[in-house]
Amino acid sequence: MSGKLQVFKTEALVVTFDPTLCIHSAECLRGLPAVFDVSRVAWIKPDAAPTEQVVEVVGRCPTGALQAIQRGKPPVPAAGAVPGPGERVRVELREDGPVIIRGAIDFSPDLGQVEPREGILSLCRCGRSASPPFCDGSHGGR
Ligand code: FES
């Protein structure tokens, strides 16, 4: 899979996937295997289940890598949605996985340059990532 945003559409729904945010928690694969199936090239089939079910499972994505937008309705914030302005930074420690930081921070990966970041940052704690300091899902043994 490339690092580009992937977009899957039906008449009622748009599902997007940002692979740079995915930590391979597999909530989607477990939640609706008919819709989310990595053995297919087009691995998301939003029309393989009722729209409400797809939206509900997308909402379980812990990092916001998956987003669902129903046509004619306001977007439903995913569990991994970015905090709004003025909200406190949130730090989550995933069991046997990354530390996830949500919010606006000054990021200094090498204790030198400071890089302003806003959104979700997923940092490796296991030492197996091929893209340190970021988590690439290698903690899951894949
Ligand atoms: S914590 Fe995910 S690759 Fe290390």
Image (tube, rainbow, N blue to C red):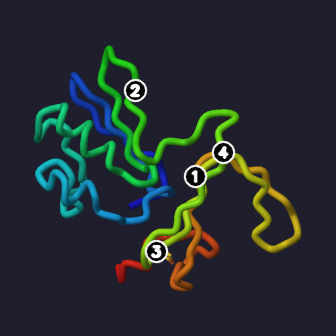
The reply, left or right, for residue 44 in relation to residue 103 is left
Q: Residue at x 75, y 69 (%)?
A: 109
Q: CA distance from mark 2 to mark 3?
A: 28 Å
Residue 96 drawn at (x, y percent): 43, 79
Q: Which tag is nearer the camera, tag 4 or tag 2?
A: 4
Q: Earlier in the sequence, mark 3 or mark 1?
A: 3
Asked if the residue at tag 2 contacts the one at tag 1, i.e. Cβ–Cβ closer than 8 Å, the answer is no
The reply, left or right, for residue 74 in relation to residue 82 is left
Q: Could you tell me the amino acid type at mark 3?
A: Gly
Q: Which mark is residue 97?
A: 3
Query: What residue is pinned by disc 2?
Result: 75
Q: CA distance from mark 4 to mark 2?
A: 22 Å
Q: Earlier in the sequence, mark 1 or mark 2?
A: 2
Q: CA distance from mark 1 to mark 2?
A: 18 Å
User: Does 25 appear above or below 138?
Assistant: above
Q: Could you tell me the amino acid type at mark 2?
A: Pro
Residue 19 drawn at (x, y percent): 44, 56
User: Does 69 appear above or below 89?
Assistant: above
In the image, farthest residue toward the front: 88
User: Does 42 appear above or below 110?
Assistant: above
Residue 82 drawn at (x, y percent): 55, 42
**Dot 3 beta carbon under 8 Å from ligand 1:** yes
Q: CA distance from mark 4 to mark 1?
A: 13 Å
